[in-house]
Image (cartoon, helix red, strand yellow):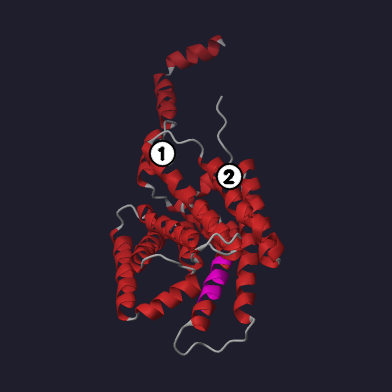
């Protein structure tokens, strides 16, 4: 031990090198710092590194395609003028496939998560959503289980807010299962048109608020503005056709077309921001929400909850193990 001490005293360069090495271990741009986390919470944007792993992302990507195909078939089959001639069972079959695939995607996210609460909540939602898709006998239970399980998962992933930006993000995330619960209860329990309109408005408002995920991205905001103008123009030019497409394809009931336009703007802004920033998870979630429509059926509710999990939460919050305080 004496020799070591003397060597250190005789070699000041070694001591200086040790100090430099120790200083090199200080937090740098490659590691998250307190300031970075504060800035992240305040802005709501995510870095490309925060996206899901490609293998985990495969199931939600397949589900998004299935949901988009089912929605397109519903719109084409129910358009007032010159509807596409399809076999009678094509649209229900497409909806069923979309529900099954989306439930499997939620289960895949659950199994990939290291958070027990998230795992249980997403599995609960996915299983009961699939059961309701296969059998109408489970629809009443699914009206509570699907949004309830996702709400528990989101609350467990986000934890207790300590700042206003964190509170805002949690409110955005939990707004989606609330809208799904109101919409499913209205259709399943026969609560009437008023409840369905409330669920539609809640969902459209939640998608509108996704514009916050763009965080000033000019390209994304321009895309959102273009989407808003397209919906407004279509509504002004052909209000009957637009309303029919919104009702049959997206389940919109009792909501003004302007609110639909703002929802299109928020969803498109988040989608383009994800693409622009290289955040495939955000883009995938926003796209799923745009294709899902109002969560008034079990398959649509599964799609809306999946999209919300990808767009409103960060992958680390959803999948990473919770930090243990010492």
Does 69 appear in magenta? yes
Q: Nearer the viewer, residue 86 or 325?
A: 86
Structural distance between the alpha carbons of marks 1 and 2: 24 Å
Instruction: Say which residue label 2 marks.
Output: 152
Residue at 55% from the left image edge and 59% from the top image edge: 191
* Vertical relation: 50 (above or below) 89: above
Residue at 57% from the left image edge and 71% from the top image edge: 66
Nearest-to-viewer mark from 1 and 2: 2
Q: Tell which circle, 1 or 2, labels the residue nearer the N-terminal end.
A: 1
Q: Is residue 129 something that shows in the picture?
A: yes
Q: Secondary structure at mark 2?
A: helix
**Residue 12, position as x, y percentages in the image:** 40, 19
- Tell me if mark 2 has few (under 14), some (14-19) or many (20+) residues whose alpha carbon lies within 10 angstroms of its own: many
Q: Secondary structure at mark 1?
A: helix
Q: Nearer the viewer, residue 107 or 232?
A: 232
* Vertical relation: 81 (above or below) 268: below
> Range of the magenta residues?
63-72
Residue at the outermost top position: 2
Q: Nearer the viewer, residue 182 or 127?
A: 182
Residue 37's disc is 1
* Vertical relation: 87 (above or below) 6: below
**Residue 6, position as x, y percentages in the image:** 49, 12
**Residue 24, position as x, y percentages in the image:** 42, 32
Residue at 59% from the left image edge and 40% from the top image edge: 321
């Amino acid at each position: 031990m004496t020799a070591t001490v003397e060597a250190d005293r005789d070699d000041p360069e070694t001591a200086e090198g040790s100090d430099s090495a120790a200083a090199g271990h200080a937090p740098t741009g490659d590691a998250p710092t307190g300031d970075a986390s504060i800035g992240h919470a305040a802005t709501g944007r995510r870095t490309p590194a925060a996206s899901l792993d490609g293998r985990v992302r495969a199931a939600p990507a397949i589900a998004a395609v299935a949901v988009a195909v089912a929605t397109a078939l519903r719109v084409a089959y129910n358009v007032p003028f010159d509807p596409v001639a399809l076999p009678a069972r094509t649209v229900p079959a497409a909806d069923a496939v979309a529900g099954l695939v989306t439930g499997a995607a939620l289960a895949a996210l659950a199994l990939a998560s290291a958070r027990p609460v998230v795992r249980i909540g997403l599995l609960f939602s996915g299983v009961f959503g699939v059961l309701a898709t296969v059998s109408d006998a489970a629809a009443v239970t699914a009206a509570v289980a699907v949004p309830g399980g996702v709400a528990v998962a989101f609350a467990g992933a986000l934890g207790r807010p300590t700042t206003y930006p964190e509170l805002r993000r949690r409110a955005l995330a939990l707004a989606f299962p609330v809208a799904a619960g109101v919409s499913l209860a209205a259709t399943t329990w026969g609560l009437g048109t008023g409840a369905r309109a409330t669920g539609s408005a809640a969902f459209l408002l939640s998608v509108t608020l996704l514009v916050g995920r763009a965080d000033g991205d000019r390209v994304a905001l321009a895309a959102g503005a273009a989407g808003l103008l397209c919906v407004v123009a279509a509504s002004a030019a052909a209000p009957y056709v637009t309303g029919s497409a919104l009702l049959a394809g997206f389940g919109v009931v009792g909501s003004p077309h302007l609110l639909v336009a703002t929802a299109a703007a928020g969803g498109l802004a988040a989608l383009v921001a994800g693409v622009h920033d290289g955040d495939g998870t955000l883009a995938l979630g926003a796209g799923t929400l745009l294709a899902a429509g109002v969560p008034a059926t079990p398959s649509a509710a599964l799609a809306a909850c999946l999209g919300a999990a990808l767009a409103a939460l960060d992958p680390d919050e959803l999948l990473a193990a919770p930090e243990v305080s010492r």
